[in-house]
């Protein structure tokens, strides 16, 4: 009996939830402006700036949107306030780029109670009930970390560098963010699988200043570091400054005392450093989510079902062609083969960010 009651209630809930969608789509049909409230993490990195630019360019007035943008300066409490303001203003959609994965259940329930669909962008939220958000678009940080680890193993193997001679430090991203969790796990799996020495891990908060500070302190603690795993380009820029200020050389020639820098984001500045051989491998994390989020909104406006998780494809770039491809498993447990592209100025000039 209980089961039957539950299914009747669920159906009712589904109907009422569905009835919310046509109301919004009617508004859109009349050519009304669609109001989106976007709670952005902050402006901590070149990647974040590119992400913000993509969202602002997409959700423009001429494209039929009113964008209410909030920069949370990397503080979750500012994002919670922004979302509650969006609810008060009865926006049509809430877009959330969550600084860290936890702590969203209450505010997302408030948005759900107000009948406002929430689209998660970039990092993930870890909630008890995934009906608290309509859909997510972003990138597979765990796959990114695994790609980097597989690249390092392939590089060391090709150069006949013994795994036990790899002494790596991990300048982590914002602790508890999807990007940090995935990239740190990818490295840890490589350490466990291949036997590298992981000397230290510390958060560089995805910023250049903190990345430099952390690198300086690690160089004081360890005199045998030969690989620095930076969880984004801006940390890599800071780490490179610290390494060069300490009179050491960044590069791929580990056997002759160079310190290898591995990074993520493949921003314009990051790939420029890769072309110069200062970053040896840069794993792409694509920030251009504006058009992808708009596609989802258009589908929802048309009352169509959308996929819950929408992953974006990404590449791997390197300073040279020592490694031509890697095999790695993504967050959906699918194994894939990924080409490694030696970076050129032409490629840099042809990229959108
Ligand atoms: C990755 C994104 C990360 C970037 C950093 O999906 O969340 O945040 O890698 C940014 O540059 O600060
Ligand atoms: Zn990513």
Image (tube, rainbow, N blue to C red):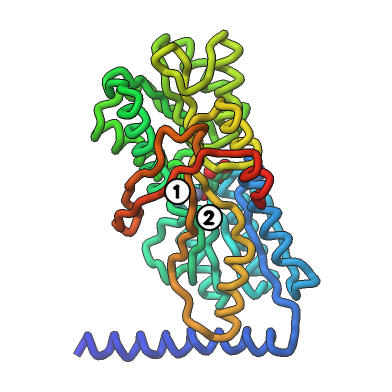
* Residue 58 against residue 230 in the figure, above or below: below
Q: Is mark 2 within 8 Å of ligand 1?
A: yes
* Residue 26 against residue 172 in the figure, above or below: below
Sequence-wise, the earlier of marks 1 and 2 is 2
State the residue at coordinates (46%, 33%). Answer: 172
Q: In the rendering, at what x and y percent does residue 334 appear?
A: 30, 58
* Residue 351 against residue 191 in the figure, above or below: below
Bin the neighbour count of mark 2 within 10 Å (Cα to Cα): few under 14, some 14-19, many 20 and up.
Answer: many
State the residue at coordinates (36%, 44%). Answer: 326
Q: In the rendering, at what x and y percent does residue 47 appear?
A: 61, 45
Q: Is residue 306 visible?
A: yes
Residue that badge 2 annotates:
122
Q: In the rendering, at what x and y percent does residue 119 appear?
A: 54, 66
Q: Is residue 161 left or right of residue 109?
A: left
State the residue at coordinates (64%, 75%). Answer: 92
What is the quadrant of residue 196 in the picture?
Answer: top left
Q: Is mark 1 within 8 Å of ligand 1?
A: yes
* Residue 162 against residue 182 in the figure, above or below: above
Tag on residue 114? none
Q: Nearer the viewer, residue 252 or 70?
A: 252
Q: In the rendering, at what x and y percent does residue 350 appear?
A: 66, 49
Q: Is residue 110 left or right of residue 166?
A: right
Residue that badge 1 annotates:
178
Q: Nearer the viewer, residue 138 or 71?
A: 138
Check if mark 1's residue and mark 2's residue have beta carbons within 8 Å. yes
Label 2 SS: loop
Label 1 SS: helix
State the residue at coordinates (51%, 46%). Answer: 284
What is the quadrant of residue 24 in the picture?
Answer: bottom right
């Amino acid at each position: 009996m209980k089961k039957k009651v539950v299914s009747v209630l669920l159906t009712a809930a589904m109907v009422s939830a569905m009835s919310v969608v046509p109301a919004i789509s009617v508004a859109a049909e009349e050519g009304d402006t669609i109001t989106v409230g976007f709670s952005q993490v902050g402006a901590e990195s070149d990647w974040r700036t590119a992400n913000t630019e993509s969202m602002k360019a997409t959700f423009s007035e001429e494209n039929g949107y009113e964008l209410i943008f909030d920069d949370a300066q990397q503080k979750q409490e500012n994002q919670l306030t922004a979302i509650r303001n969006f609810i008060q203003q009865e926006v049509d959609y809430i877009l959330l780029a969550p600084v860290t994965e936890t702590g969203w259940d209450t505010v997302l329930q408030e948005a759900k109670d107000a009948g406002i669909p929430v689209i998660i962008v970039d990092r993930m939220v870890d909630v008890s009930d995934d009906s608290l958000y309509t859909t997510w678009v972003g990138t597979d940080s765990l796959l990114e970390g695994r790609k980097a680890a597989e690249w390092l193993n392939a590089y060391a193997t090709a150069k006949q560098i013994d795994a036990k001679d790899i002494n790596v430090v991990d300048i982590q991203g914002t602790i508890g963010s999807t990007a940090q969790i995935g990239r740190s796990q990818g490295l840890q799996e490589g350490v466990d699988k291949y036997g590298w020495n992981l000397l230290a891990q510390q958060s560089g908060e995805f910023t250049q200043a903190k990345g430099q500070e952390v690198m300086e302190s690690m160089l004081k603690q360890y005199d045998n570091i030969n690989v620095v795993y930076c969880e984004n380009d801006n940390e890599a820029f800071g780490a490179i400054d610290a390494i060069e200020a300490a009179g050491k050389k960044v590069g791929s020639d580990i056997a002759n005392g160079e310190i290898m820098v591995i990074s993520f984001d493949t921003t314009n500045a990051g790939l420029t450093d890769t072309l110069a051989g200062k970053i040896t491998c840069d794993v792409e994390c694509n920030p251009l989510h504006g058009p992808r989020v708009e596609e989802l909104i258009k589908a929802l406006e048309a009352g169509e079902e959308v996929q819950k998780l929408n992953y974006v494809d990404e590449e791997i770039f390197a300073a040279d062609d020592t490694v031509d491809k890697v095999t790695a498993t993504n967050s959906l447990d699918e194994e894939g083969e990924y080409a490694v592209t030696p970076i050129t100025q032409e490629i840099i000039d042809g990229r959108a960010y």
